[in-house]
Image (cartoon, rainbow, N blue to C red):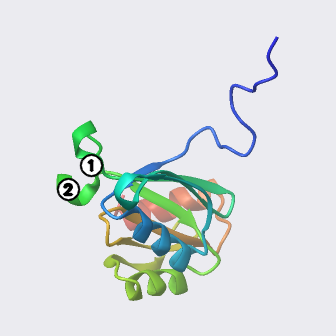
Amino acid sequence: MSDVKPIPDDYPRITPYLCVAGAAAAIDFMVEVFGATERMRISAPGGMIGHAEVAIGDGLIMVSDEYPEMGVLGPNSIGGTAVTISVYVEDADATYAKAVAAGATAERPVETQFYGDRGGMFVDPFGHRWHVATHVEDVSPDEMARRSAEMFGE
Protein backbone atom coordinates (compact mmCIF):
# COMPACT_ATOMS: atom_id res chain seq x y z
CA MET A 1 0.00 0.00 0.00
CA SER A 2 1.42 3.36 -1.05
CA ASP A 3 1.40 6.49 1.10
CA VAL A 4 1.58 8.74 -1.97
CA LYS A 5 -1.12 11.40 -1.82
CA PRO A 6 -3.17 11.90 -5.01
CA ILE A 7 -3.00 15.67 -4.40
CA PRO A 8 0.45 16.57 -3.08
CA ASP A 9 0.88 18.85 -0.08
CA ASP A 10 1.63 22.48 -1.00
CA TYR A 11 -0.24 22.26 -4.33
CA PRO A 12 -3.65 23.82 -4.84
CA ARG A 13 -6.17 21.78 -6.81
CA ILE A 14 -6.25 24.39 -9.57
CA THR A 15 -3.01 25.93 -10.79
CA PRO A 16 -2.57 28.09 -13.88
CA TYR A 17 0.23 26.94 -16.18
CA LEU A 18 1.71 29.77 -18.24
CA CYS A 19 3.67 29.02 -21.38
CA VAL A 20 5.72 31.94 -22.67
CA ALA A 21 8.50 32.86 -25.04
CA GLY A 22 11.07 33.84 -22.41
CA ALA A 23 9.98 32.00 -19.27
CA ALA A 24 12.98 33.20 -17.25
CA ALA A 25 12.09 36.84 -17.99
CA ALA A 26 8.42 36.13 -17.15
CA ILE A 27 9.47 34.72 -13.77
CA ASP A 28 11.62 37.81 -13.18
CA PHE A 29 8.56 39.98 -14.00
CA MET A 30 6.45 38.10 -11.41
CA VAL A 31 9.19 38.44 -8.79
CA GLU A 32 9.49 42.19 -9.46
CA VAL A 33 5.77 43.00 -9.67
CA PHE A 34 4.21 40.55 -7.19
CA GLY A 35 7.12 39.69 -4.90
CA ALA A 36 6.84 36.11 -6.16
CA THR A 37 9.15 33.33 -5.04
CA GLU A 38 10.48 30.72 -7.44
CA ARG A 39 9.90 27.33 -5.79
CA MET A 40 11.66 25.19 -8.37
CA ARG A 41 12.99 25.13 -11.91
CA ILE A 42 13.75 22.31 -14.34
CA SER A 43 16.13 23.50 -17.03
CA ALA A 44 15.91 22.30 -20.61
CA PRO A 45 18.48 22.37 -23.42
CA GLY A 46 19.40 25.75 -24.90
CA GLY A 47 18.82 27.67 -21.67
CA MET A 48 15.08 26.98 -21.81
CA ILE A 49 12.83 26.29 -18.85
CA GLY A 50 11.02 22.97 -19.09
CA HIS A 51 9.02 23.60 -15.93
CA ALA A 52 9.11 26.08 -13.06
CA GLU A 53 6.88 26.81 -10.10
CA VAL A 54 6.32 30.33 -8.82
CA ALA A 55 4.52 31.18 -5.57
CA ILE A 56 2.59 34.43 -5.24
CA GLY A 57 1.36 34.57 -1.68
CA ASP A 58 -0.49 31.31 -1.11
CA GLY A 59 -1.07 30.87 -4.86
CA LEU A 60 0.98 28.88 -7.33
CA ILE A 61 1.70 29.38 -11.02
CA MET A 62 3.56 26.90 -13.18
CA VAL A 63 5.66 28.29 -16.02
CA SER A 64 7.51 26.93 -19.04
CA ASP A 65 9.04 28.22 -22.21
CA GLU A 66 7.23 27.70 -25.49
CA TYR A 67 7.76 24.41 -27.29
CA PRO A 68 6.17 24.91 -30.74
CA GLU A 69 7.13 21.40 -31.84
CA MET A 70 4.80 20.09 -29.10
CA GLY A 71 2.07 22.68 -29.69
CA VAL A 72 2.97 24.60 -26.51
CA LEU A 73 2.64 28.29 -27.41
CA GLY A 74 2.29 31.46 -25.40
CA PRO A 75 -0.29 34.20 -25.97
CA ASN A 76 2.03 36.41 -28.04
CA SER A 77 2.50 33.52 -30.49
CA ILE A 78 -1.21 32.81 -30.86
CA GLY A 79 -2.42 36.41 -31.00
CA GLY A 80 -3.60 37.00 -27.44
CA THR A 81 -5.35 35.29 -24.56
CA ALA A 82 -8.91 34.69 -23.48
CA VAL A 83 -7.80 34.12 -19.86
CA THR A 84 -7.32 36.66 -17.08
CA ILE A 85 -5.31 35.78 -13.98
CA SER A 86 -6.75 37.48 -10.91
CA VAL A 87 -4.49 38.29 -7.97
CA TYR A 88 -5.39 39.92 -4.66
CA VAL A 89 -2.57 42.21 -3.54
CA GLU A 90 -1.97 44.53 -0.61
CA ASP A 91 -2.03 47.66 -2.80
CA ALA A 92 -3.57 47.39 -6.28
CA ASP A 93 -2.46 50.90 -7.26
CA ALA A 94 1.19 50.24 -6.40
CA THR A 95 1.22 46.78 -8.00
CA TYR A 96 -0.39 48.11 -11.18
CA ALA A 97 2.17 50.93 -11.35
CA LYS A 98 5.03 48.44 -10.81
CA ALA A 99 3.70 46.23 -13.61
CA VAL A 100 3.45 49.10 -16.09
CA ALA A 101 6.94 50.31 -15.11
CA ALA A 102 8.21 46.74 -15.72
CA GLY A 103 6.83 46.73 -19.27
CA ALA A 104 3.18 45.71 -18.92
CA THR A 105 0.52 47.36 -21.08
CA ALA A 106 -2.21 49.15 -19.14
CA GLU A 107 -5.58 47.71 -20.10
CA ARG A 108 -8.01 48.98 -17.45
CA PRO A 109 -7.00 51.56 -14.84
CA VAL A 110 -7.33 50.84 -11.13
CA GLU A 111 -10.73 51.93 -9.85
CA THR A 112 -12.93 51.15 -6.87
CA GLN A 113 -15.66 48.73 -7.94
CA PHE A 114 -19.23 48.43 -6.66
CA TYR A 115 -18.51 44.99 -5.17
CA GLY A 116 -15.88 46.28 -2.73
CA ASP A 117 -12.59 45.75 -4.57
CA ARG A 118 -10.21 48.32 -5.98
CA GLY A 119 -8.64 46.84 -9.07
CA GLY A 120 -7.31 47.19 -12.57
CA MET A 121 -6.04 45.10 -15.47
CA PHE A 122 -2.81 44.93 -17.46
CA VAL A 123 -1.18 42.66 -20.02
CA ASP A 124 2.35 41.55 -19.16
CA PRO A 125 5.13 41.73 -21.77
CA PHE A 126 4.56 38.02 -22.51
CA GLY A 127 0.88 38.41 -23.44
CA HIS A 128 -0.83 37.23 -20.24
CA ARG A 129 -3.64 39.40 -18.84
CA TRP A 130 -3.64 40.08 -15.09
CA HIS A 131 -6.31 41.62 -12.87
CA VAL A 132 -4.95 42.97 -9.59
CA ALA A 133 -7.28 43.89 -6.76
CA THR A 134 -7.28 45.01 -3.15
CA HIS A 135 -10.42 44.39 -1.11
CA VAL A 136 -11.43 47.78 0.35
CA GLU A 137 -15.03 47.27 1.51
CA ASP A 138 -17.19 44.38 2.70
CA VAL A 139 -20.44 44.68 0.73
CA SER A 140 -23.53 42.69 1.69
CA PRO A 141 -25.26 40.69 -1.06
CA ASP A 142 -28.30 43.02 -0.90
CA GLU A 143 -26.15 46.13 -1.20
CA MET A 144 -24.15 44.55 -4.03
CA ALA A 145 -27.38 43.78 -5.91
CA ARG A 146 -28.58 47.38 -5.37
CA ARG A 147 -25.28 48.85 -6.59
CA SER A 148 -25.18 46.49 -9.56
CA ALA A 149 -28.71 47.45 -10.61
CA GLU A 150 -27.82 51.14 -10.25
CA MET A 151 -24.65 50.74 -12.26
CA PHE A 152 -26.35 48.86 -15.08
CA GLY A 153 -29.39 51.16 -15.07
CA GLU A 154 -31.89 48.50 -14.01
The quarter in which the N terminus is drawn is: top right
The quarter in which the C terminus is drawn is: bottom left
Residue labelled with disc 2: 77
Residue 121 vs residue 73: left or right? right
- The image position of residue 129, as x and y in percent, is 36, 63
Q: Could you give the CA–CA distance between mark 2 and mark 1, rounded to whole angstroms? A: 6 Å
Q: Is residue 113 visible?
A: no
Q: Nearer the viewer, residue 87 or 141?
A: 87
Q: Residue at x 65, y 72 (%)?
A: 137
Q: State if disc 1 and disc 2 touch (CB < 8 Å).
A: yes
> Dot 2: within a 10 Å radius of its alpha carbon, few (fewer than 14), some, or many (20 or more) residues?
some
Residue 141 to residue 94: above or below: above
- Identity of the amino acid at label 1? Leu
- Identity of the amino acid at label 2? Ser
Residue 5 vs residue 136: left or right? right
Residue 138 to residue 100: above or below: above
- The image position of residue 55, as x and y in percent, is 62, 60
